[in-house]
Amino acid sequence: DGGITQSPKYLFRKEGQNVTLSCEQNLNHDAMYWYRQDPGQGLRLIYYSQIVNDFQKGDIAEGYSVSREKKESFPLTVTSAQKNPTAFYLCASSIRRDKNIQYFGAGTRLSVL
Amino acid sequence: GIQVEQSPPDLILQEGANSTLRCNFSDSVNNLQWFHQNPWGQLINLFYIPSGTKQNGRLSATTVATERYSLLYISSSQTTDSGVYFCAVEDGNKLVFGAGTILRVKS
């Protein structure tokens, strides 16, 4: 089935630890996005990538890093510099030429131990 | 950047009732989308509607671009309609999301 797969579903981070969230898509979409959602709030853009080997910071990039080595993969690393990482993280993708209609994965819930 | 405001923030309906959700945005846009987030967190794209009216089953949406607002209508609501409804508009290469409307449909 075509879609966007995020893993793991739940993740726990220890103090000072870096953790990586996986996002894979088999939709052949050009663009991929990472969002953070805090309880009772909308989605805020962390990073996005429109083509392989290129990505741009969103509104809240501090404490996060990404890579885009393959079209289908866009992993997000939450570094130890992110002091408040507990949130729900959502990955999305879109065909840029198709009106930027975004399709979302099921999300990863990150908590701090 | 573009500001997006949604109202009401919360809505409780009895099953079978109709509702209207509103999205106001601060600047002209070429892209407006409505999403539904189910209680498990999954977001589903409902409409791509930068202008005009679209219908999909019990849901319909209207965007009046010149007046900078969009409306999402839910008719004959069902418990499965519960969740959070987001409006998002494009600002440059990214989507800007409103804070959402939490809908609870009671049986």
Image (spheres, grey):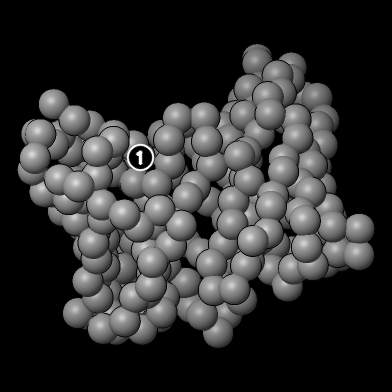
Q: Quadrant of the C terminus of chain B?
A: top right
Image quadrant occupied by the N terminus of chain B: bottom right
Q: In the rendered view, does B86 fall on the left or right side of B71? A: left
Q: On the image, which quarter does residue A46 sit in?
A: bottom left
Q: Is residue A11 visible?
A: yes
In the rendered image, residue A90, in percent from the top left (x then y), is placed at: 37, 50
Residue indicated by mark 1: A88
Query: What residue is drawn where x is 35% and y is 40%?
Result: A88
Q: Quadrant of residue B81?
A: top right
Task: Please count the marks in the image.
Answer: 1
Q: Chain of mark 1?
A: A
Residue at figure coordinates x 65%, y 16% from the top left = B106
Left/right placement of residue A31 relative to residue B25 reads left
Q: Which amino acid type is marked by label 1?
A: Phe
Crowding at mark 1 (Cα within 10 Å: few <14, some 14-19, many 20+): many
Residue B12 position (above or below residue B22): above
Q: Pinpoint residue A66: horizontal percent, then vertical percent.
A: 24, 65
Q: Report helix, strand or loop for mark 1.
A: strand
Q: Residue at x 26, y 83 (%)?
A: A53
Q: Residue at x 22, y 32 (%)?
A: A111
Residue A27 visible in the shown view = no
Q: Position of residue A1 (x, y in %)?
A: 33, 64
